[in-house]
Amino acid sequence: MIQNYFKIAFRGFYKNKGYTLINISGLALGMAMAMLIFLWVWDEWNFNKNAGNYERVGRVMHHAAQNGNTVSSPNMPFPLATALRENYKADFEQVAVSWDTEDYTLAWAAHKFKKKGRFIEPGGAKILALKMVGGDAAALEDPSNILIAESAAISIFGKTNPVGQLVKIDNELEAMVAGVYHDFPQNSDYYNLSFVAPWKLFTAFKRRQWVNELADNWEIKTFEILVQTTKSTSIEAASVKIRNELNKHSKEGKKAAVSIHPMGKWHLYSSWENGINTGGQIYYLKLFSGIAVFILLLACINFMNLSTARSGQRAREVGVRKAVGSGRTQLIFQFITESFLIVAFSFLAALLIVQLALPQFNAITEKQIELLDPNGIVSNPYFLLTCAGFCVLVSFLAGAYPAFYLSSFKPISVLKASLNHSSVHSLTARRVLVVLQFTISISLIVGTVGVFRQIQFGLNRNIGYDKSNLINVKIPPGSARLDALKNDLLQSGVVTSVAQSSGPVTDILSNARGFEWAGKAADNQDEFAVIAASHSYGKTVGWRVVAGRDFSEAFLADSSAIIVNQSAARYMGLANPVGKKVRWKDGTFNDTEYHIVGVVQDMIMQSPYEPVKQTIYFMTYAPNYLYIKLDPKTQLGNALAKVRTLFDERVPGAVLDIQFAEEQYGSKFHAENRIGKLTFLFAAIAIFISCLGVFGLAAFTAEQRRSEIGIRKVLGASVASVWKLITKEFVYLTVIAIFIAIPISYYFLTEMLARYQYRSTIPWWIFAASGLAALGVTILTVSYQAIRAALSDPVKALRSE
């Protein structure tokens, strides 16, 4: 019997090849998109969760009041780590002070490599759960050792055994490779971590020796503290216990609080607002999970629409089969079997599409997702279970109507009646589903346009400096021949200006408090971005002075001069800031009075969608970054080659890593661009799936009204009138979908844009253009079948009547 079910099903598929192809194509495409989104969501959900101890690992956070708001930061005072170790021994298994992951030069033999490294206290090896390939993670306790990632070991040492090899860090400190660890997975915050080095080695750097002076300082907060709780203590419980630990020592009093941010939430819940963890990347997981559901829904709607549309044509088949003895149960199984086979073929096709599309999908999402393991087997059990459940559900839903409705017919009633058994109820249901399809599609189009408008809004914002032909080079502090390098660059003929700064123009690396000025409110908990710059910094980056003057070598007093941006002038409440005195007194290094010599236009150094932070520029030589303005008249390749040659001559121990300001600024739109591309892809797929369904329904409508069209043509109907006859219903349905989609898409687009402080508007034409686009696609899709029916020979349609 089961064999007969399959035979009949395959005969039906072959007889109705067009409908079968549309069903399989639509379902396969919808399932493939949903699978890709599932794999991406699964990868994101498991970010930082690969280590077995991740549930007990966290980062200590500092929450402090600042002008009526609570600001959260992972920057902590050094002695807090000691306090946690000594006062909470029963709660913390490991506590480790760490410095952010940064670029360093590793030199071995005559070779130099730019690698990302992290300096951390010995307990960090257990906190990071390093999986050793060779050597021992405990070697991190020796300040002369470092641990290196497997990929870095291969790139540096090749086939040579790395353990025991000596490397030089930043042309200053020598260390021995004491172990090799497996690379962190791609969905980890430490994915690009090439080496881990002891904290004592970090403080041995000439430029880092100030760290030793902060061993007992509770006011300077510049270190990251990682913790691992004991098995008997949860992150939440430990966080409650240490909440007021900072208040016992800091001058901030009870306005400050301490918490632990669990490792599993670093990626998905990275946003903080007024001291509360408000989310982050989790928003996009929810967004794209919803899109996956909608795309699957579109594919299922197509399947169900075509199944119910054709079910009326099978009424006589049901009557004949029941007349010769088929029971209702057999008919139900027959229809369910056919539905299941369509879904099964679609599933196999979807797997093939996913496997072929994964490389491009990974390129867009910057992932390394794999569907199959090295043995060619789908390794994710949750993926397989989800797909299996979906296949069963869709098979039942799509086959339920013909299976239960048609199998209930009485044979004599069916055989006496007309072949057309499409009920009003099924017709209404199909119309509702078509409206739902285009409502979803139009909403996705509106969302895509909204995302790209927001990107363009950020791109059009005045950034306050000239990023063209501007490059920066991070150089090892203490480079003895830096002045000679600057002179060589200026005399090379390919450079117009050179300057130094303590940080890149596209980011803020240092913040400070303790500033005082006339009129400052007593309860003002100030915080400024602070940047050290040389005389020619403003000329090199092309900032715009709006009041006062730039730094100048003609003024000896500029050693105590500062320049503020417009945001800082407003923040300080200074209508005429030039000439005003500002005292920086943080209780440790600084107790100096400065005078404001100029105000510059706000420069966008962080997110282009957020307000510019109040910033103070100091006229000091801080050689962390060398900014170079290339001569636009010189060919770029020649200019960079000249810069590289001079750099290698004057700073032989470092690896030249040239960064373009334009590229660095463009990277600020990276996340939005990725979201935009994905949204565009999903919107295009949604429209295509919807059009497949409409195409099939249009073909069915034309076939169903074949005799009517033939009679109309015999009576003189034109091609245009026949086209209108078939097209108008789908146009009406699309128009209804447009009016339903407008408020829905407006709501969700408003919610999405609300995530940005600086955001684009939502003009009316977005909805009009999206609706017209959907309407145009619908008309084009239906027109093929309508014109084909209008041009058909009426004799063929009427000869059997």
Image: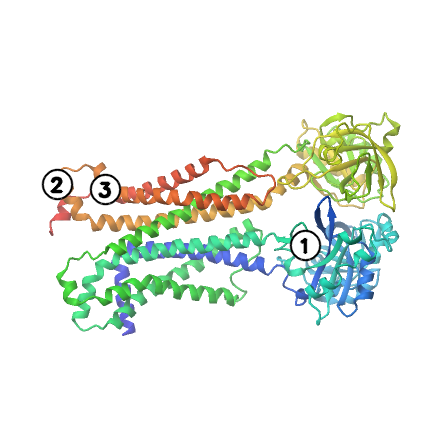
Identify which residue, 415 or 800, lies in the foreground.
415
Which is in the foreground here, disc 1 or disc 2?
A: 2
Question: Is the residue marked by circle 2 packed among few (<14), some (14-19), or many (20+) residues within 10 Å?
Answer: some
Tags 3 and 1 touching, CB below 8 Å: no
Lower sequence index among marks 1 and 2: 1
Residue 305 percent location from the top left of the image: 31, 55
**Callout 2, which amino acid?**
Val
Q: Is residue 491 visible?
A: no
Instruction: Please tell me whether mark 1 sits on a helix, a strand or a loop.
Output: loop
Lower sequence index among marks 3 and 2: 2
The figure's colour scheme reads: rainbow
Q: Which numbered marker is on residue 725?
A: 3
Lower sequence index among marks 3 and 1: 1
Q: Which numbered marker is on residue 192?
A: 1
Q: Is residue 615 visible?
A: yes
**Callout 1, which amino acid?**
Asn
CA distance for labels 1 and 2: 74 Å
Question: Is the residue marked by circle 3 packed among few (<14), some (14-19), or many (20+) residues within 10 Å?
Answer: some
Which is in the foreground here, disc 3 or disc 2?
A: 3
181 in relation to 172, above or below:
below
**Callout 3, which amino acid?**
Leu
